[in-house]
Image (cartoon, helix red, strand yellow):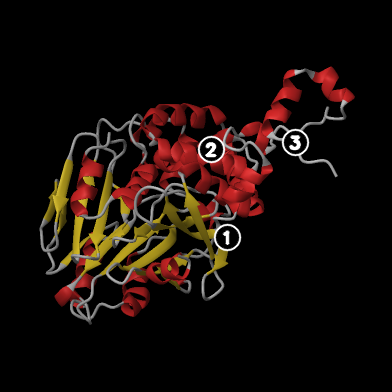
Amino acid sequence: MPNPLSRRQLIKLISLGTPFLAGCGLARIDPMHVLIRSDRFDSLDDEAQVLKRGGLYWSEDGRIRVLLVQGDAYERGYQHGKLLRAEVQENLGYMHKQMLKKFKSEELFDEAYERMRPFIPDESLQEMHGLAHGSRLPLRTIHHIHALPEISEWGGKKRLKGLVKEMMDGTLGTSCSNLSANFSATSDGRQYVVRILDWGLHRISRLHEFPLLCVHRPDRGHAFVNVGWIGFVGAVSGMNDQGITLGEMGYGDPEGETLRGKPMPFLLREVLQSAANLADVRSLISGSAGTASFVYLMSDGKSGEAELYVRDRSRFQVYKPGDLVEDGSEIVPPIKDTVYGGHYNEKMTELLSAEHGRLSPESLMREIIPQIAMKSNFQNVIYDPKALRLWVSNAKNAESRAAEQSYTAFNLAEFLKTHA
């Protein structure tokens, strides 16, 4: 049996033109073949060497796929795309069709991505490239999918036709909630951090059917788990091996919002891979070109610290546990050893004050999150950042909230140790 063609051989044959290809029986050459699309592999043996560094597992309860990716950004993206190819194609293919059906135009996504592209870290560009090649999806599709989170928070969306505005205010309504409680606020004195994602993508997509715990071991930077979905390389929830956790929410539509800045999901990916403490987090967020208006809540399990940041194009504000958060008419009263903010601030103040000293993962799951999550509740994460543990729940279908679903436990420290 002859050896498979190398990339150089394939490119040489293509350069000779169609008549020669037809004569060799190669007229139906596959344009999605990795040796044609990628300049990273010279042979299928090269591809195999990269793939063997990745691994595919399940969470202990069998509910969520756990993907281990290792190497540089392109290699990790390729492992993601190839090891979960069928799922990536099914998930992103359906979602892309629904996005175009709702937004009525591919041009919107092309324009949005081109404005963002100069600000996207090269690591993320390479990872998207690898994901496209591994999954055999067009790179354009991958770019469109990853432009959506920023479009959904962009104040300029109000200038689009009424259908899009209505969808943004309803189906994809975004106004999440976050909190960190520590010391006197919890039942055992441990720090627990909550990230409530209210972003109704389960109403226009099948994203909720494809949850993923993607554990990265990059060649440079910290290991981390991206708590997200198959085919999405940006981060909106996650934790790294330094105990840095992610939480964010959209925050109003102030003047000056733009798509010409670092997109939030790629900024948060950079935090996961690069930050060892909250000083690093502050530097990354304040030093990146702002886009839409966001509130971030980040914690450091090593020190037990947590901080809430208000970030838009023109400002970066920092609040710590016990601080009064005051921004115009928005007032969030201080609670000892607690920092918080969300869609239902008054309700959060009432609940967190009443449960002060009794908060635990169980009470957060049963009592707190169900009362402050919106109808668009898509995902919830509870972090124990000191122990590098987390619990995550996801919406089950278009009619359900993640708040009513079972939680899956994951121990990042144990996983990294077991898969050293």
Residue found at x 54% / y 54%: 230
Which residue type does callout 1 highlight? Glu
Residue drawn 42% across the image and 50% down it: 218
Of residues 207 and 134, the one drawn nearer to the viewer in this rendering: 134
**Of labels 1 and 2, the one closer to you:** 2
119 up-or-down from 23: above or below: below
Q: Quadrant of residue 298?
A: bottom left
- Say if residue 367 shows up in the picture: yes
Reading the image, the residue beneath label 2 is 129
Mark 3 or 2 closer to N-term?
Answer: 3
Neighbor class of circle 1 (other Cα within 10 Å; few <14, some 14-19, many 20+) is: some
Quadrant for the N terminus in the image: top right
Q: Position of residue 169 (x, y in %)?
A: 41, 45
Mark 3 element type: loop
Label 3 close to label 1 by CB (< 8 Å): no
Of 15 and 401, the residue lying toward us: 15
Labels 3 and 1: the sequence-earlier one: 3
Badge 2 local density, few (<14 within 10 Å), some, or many (20+)? many
Q: Give the side of residue 386 with respect to residue 116, left or right.
A: left
Which numbered disc, 1 or 2, marks the residue that appears first in the sequence? 2
Residue 87 in percent (x, y) is at: 63, 54
Mark closer to the observer (3, 2): 3
What separation in Å lies between label 1 and label 2 (alpha carbons)?
A: 24 Å
Report the Cα–Cα distance between label 3 and label 1: 38 Å
Residue at numbered disc 1: 209
Q: To which residue does mark 3 refer?
A: 5
Dot 3: few (<14), some (14–19), or many (≥20) neighbours within 10 Å?
few
Quarter where residue 160 is shown: top left
Q: Secondary structure at mark 2?
A: helix
**Dots 3, 2 in contact, CB < 8 A:** no
Q: Residue 344, percent across and down?
A: 28, 60
Q: Please, what is the three-letter code of the amino acid marked with disc 3?
A: Leu
